Amino acid sequence: PPPPPPPPPPPPLFFFKQKPPYERGVRLVGSEMCIRDRGRAGEHLVAFYLLQYCDSVILTNENSKADLILDHSDRLYKVQVKSTNSIWKHKGNEYYRWDFRPGRYRPDDAEKIRYTASDVDIYALVAIPLGKVLFVPYNTDMKSTSKRVEDFDKLDTRKSLEEALNIINHVPTLKPFK
């Protein structure tokens, strides 16, 4: 018999509200997962962490400057996810590095996009090999950052989210959903 038709493409916006992982949509596996998918993998990892403490998370479409919209305590936050899976070696140390160039280019029209305070509230820095996320508040001076692998391995993701929200909006201590 002929193979079944492929599933329809997902809608441009995904909305997760405390659903179990098996209900969160299609996953790429094996040969389907490649280097260009690390951004989406990072977005899903960030959504996983955020959903442990926040009301809901929306994965935006590719035309949005923010990758995720976070709803916490009746306030919306725009989250830009930066993912890496490579290690940068410098002066005998190993680092994960994320780039926040002042602009990036959209392939369709090569228009320069700049992140501003109205575009992003929080950066989520993802180290794919460790499965960890560092949350940092938006900063106009931020062009790139790096963290030593050994320091990133000891990172407390919840604490970094709490600190970022506190800097932005003085949000009280996060409590996990039960």
Image (cartoon, rainbow, N blue to C red):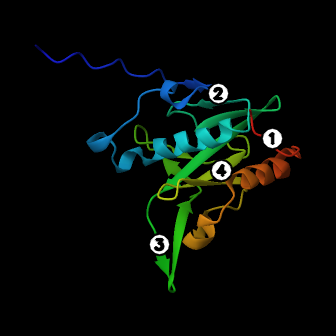
For the question of whether residue 66 can be seen, the reply is: no
Tag 4: Cα neighbours inside 10 Å, few (<14), some, or many (≥20)? many
Residue at disc 3, secondary structure:
strand
Q: From the viewer's perspective, is residue 70 above or below residue 162?
A: above
Image-quadrant location for residue 145 = bottom right
The residue that mark 2 highlights is: 18
Q: Inspect the image, locate mark 4, and give the three-letter code of the amino acid beneath it.
A: Tyr
Residue contact at pointers 2 and 4, CB within 8 angstroms: no
* The N terminus lies in quadrant: top left
Foreground of the two, 67 or 132 = 132
| Mark pair 3, 1: CA separation | 35 Å
Residue at disc 2, secondary structure:
loop
| Mark pair 1, 4: CA separation | 21 Å
Nearest-to-viewer mark from 3 and 1:
1
Image-quadrant location for residue 78 = top right
Q: Residue furthest left?
A: 1
